[in-house]
Amino acid sequence: MTRNRVLIAIAIAGLVGVLAWLSWPRSNESTTGPEMSGSEAADDTELSSQVETWPATLYFPGEGDLLFPESQELPTSLDPADRVSTLVTSLLAGPRTEHLSAPLPAEIQIRKVYWIDGRIAYLDLESPDGTPPPVSGSTREMLTVYSLVNTVLLNVPEIEGLVLLWNGRQLRTFAGHVDTMRPLSAKLDLIARTQ
Amino acid sequence: MPLAAQQDPTSTPELVSTAVAKLMLEGQPAGRVAVSQGVVGPSFALAPIAAALGVELRTGPLGDSHTLILEDRRIIFGPNQAVMLTVAPDGKTQREITRLGQLPFRDGAGLKVSLEALEKALGEPLSYRFIWLPSELELQISRPELRVLEGSINVVNQYQESVVGIEFSDKPRYRVERSPGVLVIRLLGDRLALPVKQPRVADALITAIRVSEDRVRFELADHADADEPRLQLTPKPRLVIEVFEKQNSARRVDNPSRQSASQVAGIRTIALDPGHGGPETGAIGPGGNAEKDLNLLVARALRLQLERRLRVKVVMTRTEDVDVPLETRAAIANEARADLFISLHLNSSFGATAHGAETFFLSREASDKISADIAAQENKFSSGTDDPELDLRMILWDLAQSYHLAESQRFATLVQEELNLTLGLRDRGVKQAPFHVLMGAKMPAVLVELGFLSNPEEESKLQTPAYRAELVDALVRAITRFKKQLEGGSTIEIDTAGASSGGDITGSQEASQTRTPR
């Protein structure tokens, strides 16, 4: 019995010890991630403050079947492809203004943005499981297509035409109406006139 | 539009980028090909493609003409030449002039041609299909799977002419070949299942019909000739060939079988295009109604009314729930020599409140990108030829584009007026848009959005036959007014200045040039 009591006392003491170790404050330990030195943290702060932004205008479908401008501060880049990516990513993420709509369902993403070396940019969109663009009437299709085209062309002056691809292919149309076999130009008459 | 003499025949089309792409033949790497992206589409260096396909490409002594040497023909291209010539293997006998929508040009990589030119020059004769994947910088060349089609032939005699119908189990890929007294339908990449059901020929105009697995050969009597075969897609794919007596060719318009159509000057044949079909549902209403079904119901009712009330010939791009490619829809109208093309659609938008009808015709921007560029290029070509007939055809073609656009605008205005007046719908106006289905039509062409399926109230109305009948009535009245305007000999106002890309156009925006209607 005495031996058993000794064993139980040792077990309890061990348990208390473990609990004490677990609950001991460890303020001087780093996080589980890579340790960040003070200088690196300072550099990072400087870097983020150095990233320039620009007042981009995104065009979202809205009331009256028109495109409504919405200003967003977006990080800029010398590379026009990066700017197109940023613009379209923000466009696909949807508007911040009420009563406006994202041009495409949330699951649609950018597959690639590129051009060969000229003034025509290629925006390749990707749908999950390779599904085709959403079915729609001509008005919705026009708003979808020109939400993308106007947003890109009216913000990136280096680009004069936008070719839309879907899962790597150039479709005749997205939904049976608007011709997407050619580089598209901005369509200004779809933009709502602000007071 | 500036004419040929003002163009620089040595200039190349505006290019925006160049690159070297992978060339894949039947899934295997077959070298690389230089590609240039122009404003109207990509162009590919011809030499590496010909080499990959084992086709000899000869260059003329001045380095201008480029000739593809195929087994049964030679195909000649030239830089800045908007046509390609097909000649017999002797190199002299001309067989065909094919208009190219995109101008070939020469740069450091040699002669570059469009996808369209590749398909016509190498794709059709050799049964290859070209697929350009810009995102992969890859040009794929492959032979489509060989199809074996069921076929049957029938011949109907009527009024000194014989009408031959070749019915296929699927849409055939074919080429028409002619020589004196002979007309051959040669299948490209397809084969006929033999034996083919055919009549025993006892026809004064057709002396023999010979069928093999890759061709149907018609031997005509000395006094007979045949029209260009027409492909009808509904109810089944069917090639129709009209064979007639040469001496009666000038009087064929008086044939009683054509009389009903020819009674109405200006509008004799109307092509109706019920939008979407098959897996292409078009818009889906909140109540689950598919646009394709309602479009077809409206088109059928409209066809009936037009045939009864206007006694015009109506061709439909589809009569059942099938998917018809957009290019084919315009081609059906062109083949039927329709005088008017009406594409019927129902709309949808973001949200459920959008409502009303709107009518579109092809945007000047889209039209310009196709027709102006092509016409200018053709004018360039025509400046370098001594063929006055070709010059004239090019100029007439150019004029026709402007003429059709103006007529399309006028007809669209009438449609919109009638829809607004009759139904009290919200006037969304006449608009211009780069709609693909309108691009290939060689006649006045509009796309009518009869209402919003995304609006529950309009969807509910569109389900009722009575409401659809009112829509049909409005369309019939618009067509009647248009026909009367043409018959009445009024001048046609061509809006050359006001049709900027996309703004709403109304009938009041007219001016500048006048032309006499047909």
Image (cartoon, coloured by chain):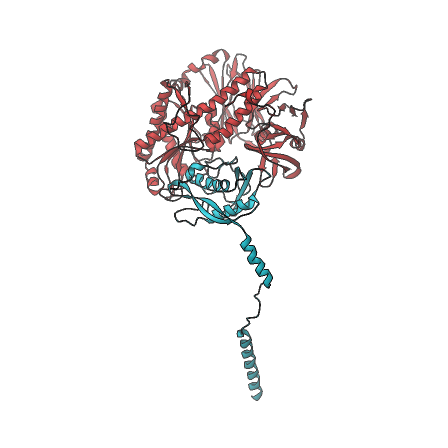
Chain colours: A cyan, B red
The image quarter in which residue B461 lies: top left
The quarter of the picture where the C terminus of chain B appears is: top left
**From where the camera sits, is residue B327 visible?**
yes
Query: Where does residue A194 sit, x and y in percent of width and height?
Result: 39, 42
The image quarter in which residue A22 lies: bottom right
Query: Where does residue A32 sit, x and y in percent of width and height?
Result: 57, 65
- Between B249 and B272, the residue placed more toward the observer is B272
The image quarter in which residue B472 lies: top left
**From where the camera sits, is residue B143 visible?**
no
Instruction: Tell me if residue A194 comes above or below residue B98 in the rendering.
Output: below
Instruction: Tell me if residue B379 comes above or below residue A35 in the rendering.
Output: above
Instruction: Tell me if residue B298 comes above or below residue B6 in the rendering.
Output: below
Is A26 placed left or right of B259 in the picture? right
Q: Residue furthest top?
A: B247
Instruction: Tell me if residue A160 comes above or below residue B103 in the rendering.
Output: below
Query: Where does residue B455 sit, x and y in percent of width and height?
Result: 35, 42
Query: Where does residue B293 sit, x and y in percent of width and height?
Result: 40, 37
Task: Say which residue appears at 55% left-offset and 81% top-offset.
Answer: A13
